[in-house]
Image (spheres, rainbow, N blue to C red):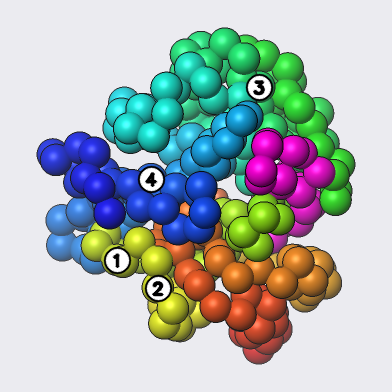
Amino acid sequence: MTITNGQSGTNVHEIADGIYRINTPVVIDGGGGFSFNQYLIVDDEPLLFHTGPRKMFPLVHEAVKTLLPAGRLRYIGFSHVEADECGSLNEWLAIAPQSVPVCGMVAAMVSISDLADRAPRALADGELLALGKHCVRWLDAPHLPHAWECGFLTEELTSTLLCGDLFTQGGSDLAPVTESDILGPSEAFRHQMDYFSHTKNARAMLEKLASTNPRTLACMHGSAWRGDGAKLLGALADALAA
Ligand SMILES: [Fe+2]
Ligand SMILES: [Fe+2]
């Protein structure tokens, strides 16, 4: 793990071959804290998955620059439209002239074709996007855990699921990657914050994600996780149904 900003504690850690977690901890007075992770896939056509909140742009930019010249970024992807997912999208488009937003069809139609300063590369459910050695596939997941336009990317070289807000864990100083249980902590957080949409289709979508057999889950909040991803996604489906 490399600290890229001493004041905020922003740090980078390679969680899978060529995939870097950029983590910014947020200490909350009297609370347990929180964290925001972005993931950078370093390749011929580098992809950043979620931008972080707009006000965090300087910290994420500083971290990206330790891994590659930020102007080389080709794709700025995200799961759904929220500040922590794409708040600094236009800042990234401005500093990386070859870059375009990457999102699902619904996000492109409803929001990004209007909000973004360049037209998005909209991916259909199951569509592949080659980055070089790495290759990502978009999977639609409407309302899982929230937002109509929600979806995820799975990276095929490393079997990494960029799982956004799934398995969100509270806390500001968690390990970059863990092999221990994250379902318990994320379920505790879900019961506290109620950020899932209660969609009836959760199990079918979790099964679709599980069918990619992820070995690493790149969570947006908390530790990334390594293990039998299909099994853990199944356990989440059971917990949501309980
Ligand atoms: Fe979200
Ligand atoms: Fe989030």
The kind of residue tagged 3 is Val
Image coordinates for residue 189, horizontal then vertical, percent: 43, 71
Image point 63% across, 29% down: which residue? Answer: 45
**Tags 2 and 1 in contact by the CB under 8 Å rule?**
yes
Label 3 environment density (alpha carbons within 10 Å; few <14, some 14–19, many ≥20): many
Figure check: 49 above or below 226: above
Looking at the image, is mark 1 or mark 4 earlier in the sequence?
4
Q: Quadrant of residue 30?
A: bottom left
**Residue where numbered disc 1 is placed:** 174
Looking at the image, is mark 3 or mark 4 earlier in the sequence?
4
**Residue where numbered disc 2 is placed:** 178
**Residue where numbered disc 3 is placed:** 100
Q: CA distance from mark 2 to mark 4?
A: 15 Å
Image coordinates for residue 98, horizontal then vertical, percent: 62, 14
Q: CA distance from mark 2 to mark 1?
A: 9 Å
SS assignment at label 2: strand
Image point 85% across, 48% down: which residue? Answer: 125
**Residue where numbered disc 4 is placed:** 22
Q: Is residue 233 left or right of residue 31?
A: right
Residue 57 showing in the rendered view: no
The kind of residue tagged 4 is Ile
Looking at the image, is mark 2 or mark 4 earlier in the sequence?
4
